[in-house]
Amino acid sequence: MSPDDIRQQIELKVVELIKTKLADGSISEERSQQISQMVLSTLTPGMTLEALYKAIPKLDDAYPELSPIILPYLREYEDKVAQTAEVTVRDFIRQGKYDAATQLAKKAIAQDIDLVWTS
């Protein structure tokens, strides 16, 4: 799945959420426009996977109603990247490669790891 596919999925889910909330009156027209603008300006076409995964957590900073949309993507990042990095860091430590373990751990914390989509 490409970064643009993920971006489009998120945008579609945001549109569906906005439509539902407008229909039931739980969101104003103005707020829906603000959310739309923020999503479109934060998630841009052609982003790398790394940039996309750094941008996704920012979506619910000002708009907590987006949390249910972004949470599965954050969990997926945790499952695919952070846990893999953790296992690799442990392997480096067992092999006595402490510098490599430290560098990888710092990159994982900073979300500065080159990502490859495997599914």
Image (cartoon, rainbow, N blue to C red):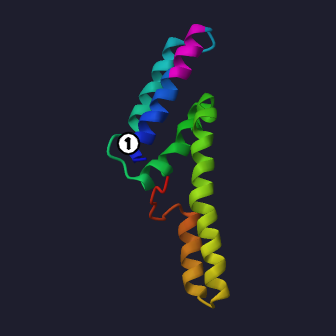
Residue 113: % across, % down = 48, 65
Q: Which portion, as a residue range, is magenta?
A: 16-23
Residue 73: % across, % down = 57, 44
Taking the spot 62% from the left edge, 41% from the top edge, the residue there is 71
Q: Residues within 10 Å of mark 1 (few under 14, many from 20)?
A: some
For residue 6, what is the image quadrant? top left
Q: Position of 92 compared to 39: left or right?
A: right
Magenta segment's dominant SS is helix
Q: Residue furthest front?
A: 119
Residue 17: % across, % down = 56, 22
Residue 1: in sight, yes or no? yes
Residue 78 lies within the magenta run: no
Disc 1: which residue? 4
Q: What's the amino acid at mark 1?
A: Asp
Against 110, is 17 above or below? Answer: above
Taking the spot 54% from the left edge, 63% from the top edge, the residue there is 110
How many numbered circles does the render carry? 1
Residue 20 lies within the magenta run: yes
For residue 90, what is the image quadrant? bottom right
Taking the spot 48% from the left edge, 64% from the top edge, the residue there is 112
Residue 31: in sight, yes or no? no
Residue 81: % across, % down = 56, 60
Q: Residue furthest left?
A: 46
Taking the spot 32% from the left edge, 45% from the top edge, the residue there is 46
Circle 1 SS class: helix
